[in-house]
Image (cartoon, rainbow, N blue to C red):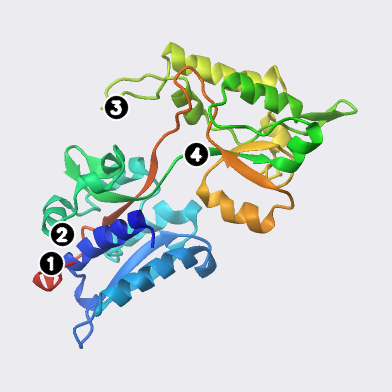
Amino acid sequence: MNKKLSVVCVGVVSIAMLSACSGEGTSGDGDVTLRMLAWGNGPAELQGEREILDVFEEENPGIKVELSNVPWENYNERLTTMSAGRNQPDVFWMIDAAAMTNYANQGMLMELDELIEDAGIAEDEYLPGAWDIGTWEGVQYALPRDLISHHIAYNKDMFDAAGHPYPESGWTWDDFLEAAEATTIEENGRITQFGVAGMIWEEMIVQNGGASFSEDGSTVLIDSPESVEAIEFMRDLIHEYRVAPLATEAEGLGNMFLANRAAMSYGGPWHWMQYESDGEFEWDIVEVPAGKAGNKAQLLGLPVGIGSQTDIQRKRGSYLNF
């Protein structure tokens, strides 16, 4: 099992072991059952998560994790409703750090600092900056898992057909534009294949040294020269260079990269399995292209926390070794 995923399992889930769970989750034979909520469209999508939890259960007899799922688009609403109805899961995923701070402000999350210390979990076990994903106003409310960044996925077949070399590490916005122009196809005045789709403006401003807000959230930076330049470049890819689709041109096509209508796309690891299983083409990934700030991408992570309704006292001492 990947070390970072192990840290999370023996992190948030194990911290939840310290807090045990509600009376309903404790069986008569002393076993403890934790209710964990994640997003997904069924057990198949969460197979990897279940495998991680199975390993955890094997290593920690007496601890059971009941994994439930909700579709991503309904996740926040369902979790908030469950919390309001006093039916909150013990452990749950959060869409992002913004959702985490919202939950913390609503009192839906347990403060973890004392439990983290008891469990012997150290910040230096994580990538620099990762710890901050679960921090709000100096309090740790979550631990991060699935630490990732966006990449550029590219269709090797389309690049081969265009006679253009594949993107390589260290490439720039100029290289990106050149590749997008080379792989865009127009037929009878209509673009049938775009060079790039699925662009993410937040990533582009990071590549150019910009930001939406300052790190402490006190200053708006979306109007900084670096941010404005990045957004203008993205606009030009659509309207001037015509290598990326208008909203009307992408409507109804879903993931244009998977639909074989775009040679490149921003994406993350959540796409790779689908591309591999459903994509009828050869593909690969490369780091994002560099604006003024270099080949930089946001460090993204999935915050996982413990619900404030979890009973922190039940059997806490029995699980300190986790």
Q: Secondary structure at mark 4?
A: loop
Whether pointer 3 and pointer 2 mark residues with C-beta atoms closer than 8 Å, the reply is no
Q: Secondary structure at mark 3?
A: loop
Binning the other alpha carbons within 10 Å of mark 3 as few (below 14), some (14 to 19) or many (20 upward) gives: few
Residue occupied by mark 2: 119
Residue occupied by mark 3: 215
- In the displayed structure, would residue 233 be above or below residue 321? above
Binning the other alpha carbons within 10 Å of mark 4 as few (below 14), some (14 to 19) or many (20 upward) gives: many
Mark pair 1, 2: CA separation: 6 Å
- Which circle's residue, 3 or 2, is located before the other in the chain? 2
Query: Residue 6 at x, y = what percent?
Result: 32, 60
**Residue kind at label 2, given as amino acid type:** Ala
- Which circle's residue, 1 or 3, is located before the other in the chain? 3
Between 110 and 318, the one lying in front of the other is 318
In the figure, residue 88 lies in which quadrant?
bottom left
Binning the other alpha carbons within 10 Å of mark 2 as few (below 14), some (14 to 19) or many (20 upward) gives: many
Residue occupied by mark 4: 150
- In the displayed structure, would residue 150 be above or below residue 201? below
Q: Secondary structure at mark 2?
A: helix
Drawn side of residue 21 relative to residue 54, left or right: left
Residue occupied by mark 1: 320
- In the displayed structure, would residue 280 be above or below residue 253? below
Q: Nearer the viewer, mark 1 or mark 3?
A: 1
- Which circle's residue, 1 or 4, is located before the other in the chain? 4
Q: Residue at x 12, y 74 (%)?
A: 318
Query: Residue 185 at x, y = what percent?
Result: 81, 30
Q: Secondary structure at mark 1?
A: loop
Q: Nearer the viewer, mark 3 or mark 2?
A: 2
- In the displayed structure, would residue 213 be above or below residue 281? above
